[in-house]
Amino acid sequence: MVNYDPSARLPSSKELPDSDDTPVDNQLQKSIPDLLRSVLAMAWAERMDWFFGIRMGIYYDQNLPAIVPDAFLSLGVKRFYDENLRPSYVLWEENKLPILVFEVVSQIDRGEYSTKKAEYARLGFLYYVVYNPFRCDKPRLEVYKLVNNAYELLNSDRIWLPEIGLAIGIERGTYLGISREWLYWYDEQGERFLTPEEQMKQAQQEAQQVLQAQQKAQQAEQKAQQAQQRTQLLAEQLRSLGIDPDSLS
């Protein structure tokens, strides 16, 4: 856990480097967190007390460089500071540890199951999520929870995170036109939150259904008007023949 001297002159986020200049060596390391953040932005659109960072530095010691997980989630903080957004996440400014850190394993070992895991546990992040798309004999998604200063693996296909109020899991789907296995958020009943693309498609389908219903109603109204016109025409023809149409009812 991290503690700071409130009387110390600590650098601000604007004074600290906002990048470690380490390139992302796997496209999934950006695309998967992007999807998770996009879904949260829709599911928590009314909430302003959360922040989801992607490849952003977390500063925990003014004398050390930032750690840069692939993604992290923090609760109880401002979602936005100003129009320039956060350059980095500085713990002595935020006063909140991220509740979840996330790593996507690339083909290059970066210590996701060893050094990074130990470091995240030491710093006190409650949840550590690791996704390894290259695994065949072990679970590709692993979620660890900090218990007595050590991470314990949570075994489930979809792991409920009560402190966050969401579950996280994997299933096949399509995002950015790419069909593969993706990570998603789920509610307590196990219902998956839709992606922005899926919500747009759903809205378009609903709009099309409404339009079709309106068109059917208009067609039905037109048919009723035509039937009424035929009835009136027939009645006029009967009257011209000296027959009272009302007497036939």
Image (cartoon, grey):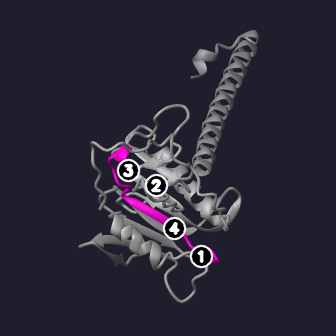
Residue positioned 50% across, 52% down in the render = 53
The amino acid at mark 2 is: Ile
Label 4 and label 3: CA atoms lie apart by 20 Å
Among numbered discs 1 and 4, the one appearing first in the sequence: 4
Are the residues flagged by discs 3 and 2 in contact, CB closer than 8 Å?
Answer: yes
Among numbered discs 3 and 1, the one appearing first in the sequence: 3
Image depth: mark 4 or mark 2 in front: 2
What SS does tag 3 mark? helix
Residue beneath label 3, please? 91
Label 2 and label 1: CA atoms lie apart by 25 Å
Label 3 and label 2: CA atoms lie apart by 7 Å
Q: Which mark is residue 103?
A: 4
Q: In which quarter of the image is the N terminus?
A: bottom left
Residue beneath label 1, please? 133
Residue positioned 64% across, 78% down in the render = 107
The amino acid at mark 4 is: Glu
Across and down, in percent, residue 226 comes to: 71, 24
Q: Residue 58 carries which label?
A: 2
Are the residues flagged by discs 4 and 2 in contact, CB closer than 8 Å?
Answer: no
The amino acid at mark 1 is: Pro
Across and down, in percent, residue 28 comes to: 63, 65
**For the magenta stretch, what is the residue range?**
92-109
Query: Label 1 crowding class (10 Å Cα cut-off): few <14, some 14-19, many 20+?
Result: some
| Residue 148 lies in the magenta-colored region | no
Query: Label 2 crowding class (10 Å Cα cut-off): few <14, some 14-19, many 20+?
Result: many
Among numbered discs 4 and 2, the one appearing first in the sequence: 2
Across and down, in percent, residue 127 comes to: 37, 65
